Amino acid sequence: MKSLFDFYGETKIFVSLRSEVYFYKLKIMGRVITSQELARKATDLMPGGVNSPVRSFVYVENPPIYVDSAKGSKIKTVDGDEILDFVLSWGAIILGHAHTFVVREVSKSLENGTSYGLNHTKEIEFCEILKKIFPESLFRVMNSGTEATMTAVRLARAYTKKKYIIKFSGCFHGHSDQFLTSAGSGMATLSIPSSAGVPEEFTSCTITLDFNSDQLEEAFKKYEIAGVILEPLPGNMGVIIPEEKFLKTIFDLCEKNSAVVIFDEVITGFRTGWGGISNSGKIKPIIFDSDGEREIEIKTRKPDITTFGKVVGGGFPIGIVRSERKIMEMLAPSGQVYQAGTFSANPISLTGGISTLKTIAEYENGFYKKLRQITKMFFDVLKNWSVRKGISISINAETGMLSVFFTEKSPKNFEEAKKSDTKMFKRLFSFLLKNGILIPPSPFEAWFVSISHTEDDVQKFSEVIERF
Ligand SMILES: Cc1ncc(COP(=O)(O)O)c(C=O)c1O
């Protein structure tokens, strides 16, 4: 006999939230809990109803969604909606959700225990993959990008015996105290200039400058700089293209003043290419704005320290610091810089990482070539749509990531990115979501593309955006 919940139907209801009226589809498919019911419960359980701020969708004035499952390029919500995903766990997923090989390898590994807090063979296997790319380097594996950047700066200060760090407005390096000034990502989205609860003294050794600016020389004259940390291709104020001369100035000044360059490649590492920009020494953006479309190549040098995260964990928590032996051996127990973690390099994250990196390495006809082609297809859809509709947009893209700004010219820093028409962005977000497409709920987050995004996905994206 059919129970009440076996009933398949679709009901349309209206809900008022923050004085705006939203339209919901409530599907009863053997499930009773909808996204909106969960969101209501969540506010009594978690601050803002979430465990990471941007998940609240508060900036885009939309109610949050609740994911039930994910496969390939799509997520399925608890409401039964299948949604094309450009968030991809904020860039952590590159093969697509629940990739068969990764799931199989991790499932096998689970049988052998989840965390030992002791050494194991996967650490050797994983670091040997990295060592082939960076033969002169040692690696320390931890649980998040936040930990990795925190450790990188600690190493920079210990190595140079200086205390000031330069970072750039709109770049995001995780949520440790010293980085919470003019940061990108969620802080940019929520317009929080500096976090409450962080005493001024804690950020007094962080010098924040504008990306692509000529402010570096002055800062080096004024302060004893230990290091400069940057996303070499920022993704946290949207994707912003660095100028070659800006990157060169960073390296020249660091060399001259015995400071270290830290590339935070938590996003770009193994996304734009194998080993990231630290390995290739190149950034190859594709740009579209009122000056037309162009593909450029920006050359850069290898940084003293790199941080990785996201993609290298294959969807599991991870953070990595890479540098030459002379810097890395300052870490305890070889040296006096302290860093430790119960779950550091746990076998599950490393199995996720190894199986992901193996899949990338063994991909037929070149993984990054294919990923770039798919990214370019979405780029072209956006470009052609804007030209046909006469809407001014700029698109900054690299392999596996892109951003759309409602500006005439491609923005060069956070100030320019903030000039993007936010109302248009919010409208676009809502329209796409209503039509089964999820882009990041902020103009200050990159859209991510996985190798599982298909030509059918491109077709769907094209059909939907044409109606906007
Ligand atoms: C460039 C960059 N660095 C560091 C972090 C922090 O990484 P996690 O969220 O793993 O702590 C992020 C997170 O988005 C990031 O984008």
Image (tube, rainbow, N blue to C red):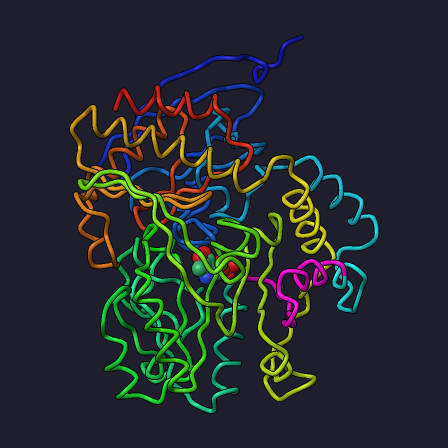
Q: Which residue is drawn at 63% across and 44% down?
A: 360
- Say above or below: 81 vs 165: above
Residue toward you, 135 or 40: 135
- Say above or below: 151 vs 440: below
Residue 38: percent from the left, percent from the top? 47, 38
Q: Which residue lies furthest to the right in this view?
A: 112
Q: Residue at x 31, y 78 (%)?
A: 207
Residue 193: percent from the left, percent from the top? 27, 66
The quarter of the image holding the N terminus is top right
* Residue 355 horizontal side relative to residue 211, left or right: right
Residue 356: percent from the left, percent from the top? 65, 46
Q: Residue at x 57, y 18 (%)?
A: 5
Residue 468 shown in magenta: no
Residue 224: percent from the left, percent from the top? 35, 89
Query: Which quadrant of the structure image shows residue 298?
Result: bottom left
Residue toward you, 303 or 235: 303
* Residue 20 horizontal side relative to residue 319, left or right: left
Q: What stretch is highlighted in magenta?
A: 125-144
Q: Which residue is drawn at 23% across and 48% down?
A: 410
Residue toward you, 183 or 14: 183
Q: Residue furthest bottom?
A: 161
